[in-house]
Image (cartoon, rainbow, N blue to C red):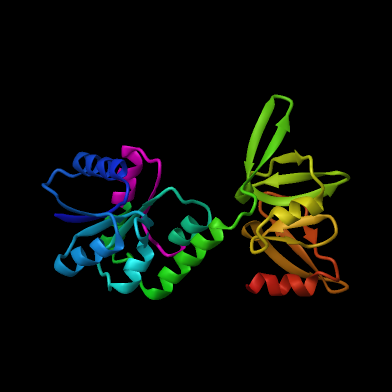
Amino acid sequence: MKILILEDEIPAYQKLTKCLDAFFDVKISQDWARSIIDGKKLLAENSYDFILSDIQLLDGLSFDLFNSVKIETPIIFCSAHDDYLFQAFNTNGIAYILKPYSQNDFNKAILKYQALFKKGDYNTLNNHTIDALKSALQEENTTYKKRFVIKKATGIQLLNTIDIALITASGDFCLVNDKDGKRHTISQNLGSIHQQLNPKKFFKINRSEIVNIDFIENIESHFKNRLLISMKNHKEKVMTSSSTTSDFRKWLEN
């Protein structure tokens, strides 16, 4: 078995080799490149069973390497990036390992690659998929709020923005429903919170409520050009205002 490792950091490369040795019983031949230039040369001269690739290399993104060289070999990405990028990986059926990872995390990623490849469900990279991944990475790097500090009687908790389903104004603070239907209080007004959120994910449907598109279950028409929205793990439906309905419809399609 022959494997190509694309990783610019030496300690990360060494960890990958240890994980590979611990997982495979057969002898493994490994090539290593830290840059796009070296990676191109190795891919032109060799064929591989699969590739382990970081996203950021010494001279740019590995995405640019895969955009310039036709790759039929399965790729498992290894990166510390999260949120939007890994949603894009999941959408496109691409295996990945999130740093920092354990041997168990590594094993699961390899088993996923093997299962997808065996069933013929593995999606090889094409220009469209790479563009989607680059777009997700750019979106992830935009400075939107990633988490809020929640003050509880028992102490301080952190609430990740991607886990917020619904935000409701309540005077000078807001009530937040999370992915599990639990309610939290954020000591900021709705306008302030709205400015910190990614507009592709969150929409202010009326004067007092903001919804996360990932938690919308159903939308139905209502009177006076309004829409009723059912949210995951939230019993009561929320409603757009007459003035926001048109923009909300357009936002859903973006």
Nearest the eye: 207 or 215 = 207
Q: Position of residue 239 (x, y in %)?
A: 81, 62
Relative vertical location of residue 77 with respect to residue 98 in this rendering, above or below: below
Residue drawn at x 45%, y 65% is 133
Q: Residue at x 88, y 73 (%)?
A: 224
Please state, as top left, top right, bottom left or bottom right, where the N terminus lies in the image: bottom left
Q: Relative to residue 29, is residue 139 depicted above or below?
A: below
In the rendered structure, the answer to whether residue 149 lies left or right of residue 52 reads: right
Q: Residue at x 73, y 39 (%)?
A: 184
Q: Quadrant of residue 105?
A: top left
Q: Residue furthest top?
A: 154
Q: Is residue 96 magenta?
A: yes
Query: Does residue 123 show up?
Result: no
Residue 21: percent from left, percent from top: 19, 41
Say if 185 sits above or below 38 in the image: above
- The segment highlighted magenta reads 91-111
Please say whether residue 233 is visible from this viewpoint: yes
Q: Position of residue 195 (x, y in %)?
A: 74, 56
In depth, the one of 60 and 157 nearer the eye is 60
As drawn, is 94 to the left or to the right of 32? Answer: right
